[in-house]
Every structure is written in structure tokens, then in C-alpha cells.
Amino acid sequence: MSTMAKQHSRADRLREYAATVEVAAISVAAMGVLVRAREGRAWTADLPPEVVFAATTVDERSLPASVWVALRRADVDGAVEAMIGVSQTTFVVESREEMGEGYRLQTVEETRPLPEIDLLITQLSAMLDIPADVLAMLAEWGADDPRTASEIADLLDRRLARDEAIREAAARAAVETYPTAPAPRHHVPDGGGLEMSVADAVAVLRLSEEQARALATLVRRVPVTLTG
């Protein structure tokens, strides 16, 4: 292939790469609507949402807190750049053969990192307890589709109402279990370990209503101490 033809081919691949990133940015923008909607609602966890996001791993990987912060500020380009910075998925711009050690031909590839939309979706899914396939559908709709914001609001309303119902049920179970004044939150006994109310444990561990009832039954029968 002539030098001019190679340059033309490389330029085409670079344009294709840019187009791929632009398509990914559409999905990132849709997830930004989700992040801002969640930020607009009460946050009861001890850690900030961006910290919880970064700590949510998917197959031992996670995107950094800066992605959440960029989406919170509607900075799609910043979020895409942060995702590209930790990406393990590449786009091959050019592949050529060069003479290596021992005068053997070896293939050398020029690559560019791509934002991993699947990782963003699955990480948000695990953090917010929303099925990944639902988030993938919202990502396809994009941020400008009026259905996106409406569906996100409905999803969050349902989950936050459920979580509040679970916390209230756990609190009632805790009062029934310990009718006297409860111990201080997150009290550390002299012998080490962690002591907290059933309601706090439910909130921290994100237990389901069934799991909350089981925990309340357990502590009713015997004191439970968490140790490191």
C-alpha cells in the first residue's frame, strides 16, 4: 500500500473512532440524567454518592468518582475523558508489520481507548438497584428523549419509596425488640466490634424487607456483634 493510501486509511479510521466516541457520549449523557435525578433526592448513606459509586465494583473493576462528579455537573465530555482514562477496551486505528528482534516481522497496532458504556451501566445498576437492561434501554433513548427523564423519575420514586418502607419496618421491629432506649448509633464496645440498631444495619447493608425481618428476629433471640 502506498504512503498516501495508508494515510488516507488511517484518517478514515480516526474519523470512525471519533464517531464511535460520539455515539458513546449519547449513552453517557443519558446516564447523566439518572445521576442528576438521584442527586436531587435525599441521600441517607454515610458516604457521598460519588464515593459509593467508585466503591461499587463490577467484576473487580469500577469507574472512578470523577465520572459521577462530571455527570452531576452535566459535563459529558469530562465524564467520557475520565472513562477513557481507565478504559481496557481499545479501537485499532492502524495495524502494520515491522521488523523486530532477530529480523522477524511483528505486527504493531496503533490503538485508542474507548469509553466502556457497559461498565458504566452495570456499575450504576449495582449501585442504584436498577436492572442493567433497563438502563441500557434508557441509554439507547438518549438524554433528549422525553421518555428518559420520565422513566428515571418513576424508577427512583419506586425504589426510594420501597427503601423508606423497609427502614420504617426495620425501625418498628427494632422498637419491638428493644422497647427501652436504643444504644448509641455505631457504638464500639470495649471488647471491640460494632454495635448498631437494626434500622441502621438495614440501611448500611441495604437489606431487603425479608432480610430485615430475619435480622430483627435474630437479634430478638440473641445479641449480635459485628467484629473485624
Image (cartoon, rainbow, N blue to C red):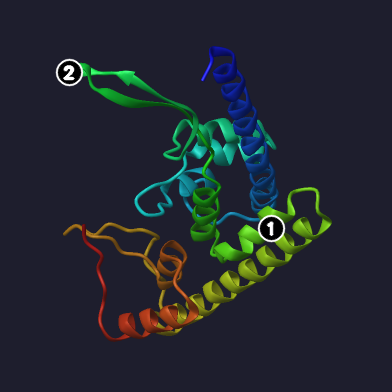
Closest to the observer: 100 or 194?
A: 100
Q: Position of residue 201 (x, y in %)?
A: 40, 67
Vertical comparison of 193 with 168: above or below: above
Residue 130 is at least partly visible in this image: no
| Residue 6 relative to residue 100: left or right | right
Closest to the observer: 86 or 216?
A: 86
**Residues under numbered marks 1 and 2 in contact, where contact means CB atoms less than 8 Å apart:** no
Q: Which residue is mark 2?
A: 102
Q: Position of residue 88 (x, y in %)?
A: 42, 39
Residue furthest top in the image: 3
- Kindly identify the residue that appears in the image at 62 percent across and 58 percent down: 136
Vertical comparison of 153 with 9: above or below: below
In the image, what residue type sits under mark 2?
Gly
Closest to the observer: 39 or 200?
A: 39
Residue furthest right in the image: 146
- Kindly identify the residue that appears in the image at 62 percent across and 36 percent down: 21
| Residue 145 relative to residue 102: left or right | right
Question: What's the mark number on residue 138?
Answer: 1
Q: Position of residue 121 (x, y in %)?
A: 55, 53
Q: Position of residue 89 (x, y in %)?
A: 45, 40
Looking at the rendering, which quadrant does residue 149 occupy?
bottom right
Residue furthest front in the image: 1
Residue 72 is at least partly visible in this image: yes
Category of crowding for the residue at label 2, using alpha-carbon neighbours closer than 10 angstroms: few (below 14), some (14–19), many (at least 20): few
Looking at the rendering, which quadrant does residue 218 occupy?
bottom left
In the image, what residue type sits under mark 1?
Leu
Image depth: mark 1 or mark 2 in front: 2
Question: What's the mark number on residue 219?
Answer: none
In the structure shown, which secondary structural element does the residue marked by tag 1 occupy? helix
| Residue 133 relative to residue 219: left or right | right
